[in-house]
Image (cartoon, rainbow, N blue to C red):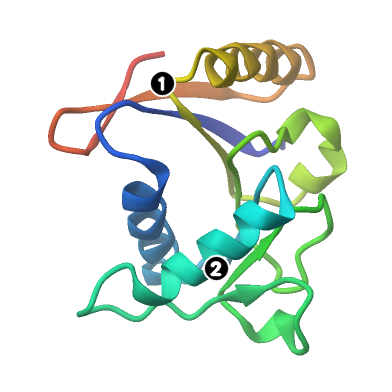
């Protein structure tokens, strides 16, 4: 059975405000996660951000290239590599495309593509990903960010 693919349309809050919350929810469910970014610089920036994003929270994570990466509940990388931590959820952010290597979607509970609704290039890329994944037989759903930062299923 193919993984569910969720498209998260960021409109009210940036990725830095929403991704950590979703990662926390994954860890609370006992799911490990993998965050794939569009560039090494962005992966490094997200790694740094997750250490300090909220004073009253600690989200264990690491870069996929580090030693003992398989022990981390959340891994981050810019490459399309298999997750050593047995990720149940894979996030695609900042230009990373899930359709670029469909084998990375095998065995996942879900994959989540997050895109900036204020960026026309990101919107266009998300539409292309939607079409490609739907044609490949993946169940896709579209979630729009509400004014309060929650998510509403739209399609």
The residue sitting at 54% across, 76% down in the picture is 61
Residue 51, placed above or below residue 35? below
- Work out which quarter of the rendered image holds the C terminus and state it: top left
Residue 119, placed above or below residue 40? above
31 left or right of 50 in image: right
- Work out which quarter of the rendered image holds the N terminus and state it: top right
Kindly identify which residue carries mark 1. 117
Q: Which of 45 and 153 lies nearest the eye of the viewer?
A: 45
The residue sitting at 55% across, 61% down in the picture is 45
Classify 10 Å Cα crowding around label 2: few (below 14), some (14-19), many (20 and above). Answer: some
The residue sitting at 73% across, 71% down in the picture is 64
Are circles 1 and 2 on residues that touch, CB within 8 Å? no
Tell me the element at label 1: loop
Residue 24 position within the rendered picture, expressed as x and y whole percent measured from the top left = 37, 65
88 left or right of 59 in image: right
Mark identifier at residue 47: 2
């Amino acid at each position: 059975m193919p993984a569910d693919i969720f498209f998260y349309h960021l409109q009210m809050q940036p990725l830095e405000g929403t991704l950590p919350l979703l990662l926390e929810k994954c860890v609370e469910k006992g799911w490990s996660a993998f965050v794939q970014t569009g560039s090494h610089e962005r992966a490094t920036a997200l790694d740094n951000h997750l250490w300090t994003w909220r004073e009253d929270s600690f989200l264990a994570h690491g870069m996929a290239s580090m030693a003992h990466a398989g022990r981390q509940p959340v891994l981050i990388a810019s490459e399309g590599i298999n997750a050593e931590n047995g990720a149940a959820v894979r996030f695609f952010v900042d230009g990373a495309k899930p359709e670029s290597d469909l084998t990375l979607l095998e065995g996942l509970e879900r994959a989540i593509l997050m895109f900036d609704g204020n960026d026309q290039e990101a919107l266009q890329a998300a539409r292309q990903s939607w079409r490609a994944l739907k044609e490949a037989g993946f169940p896709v759903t579209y979630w729009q960010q509400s004014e309060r930062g929650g998510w509403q299923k739209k399609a």
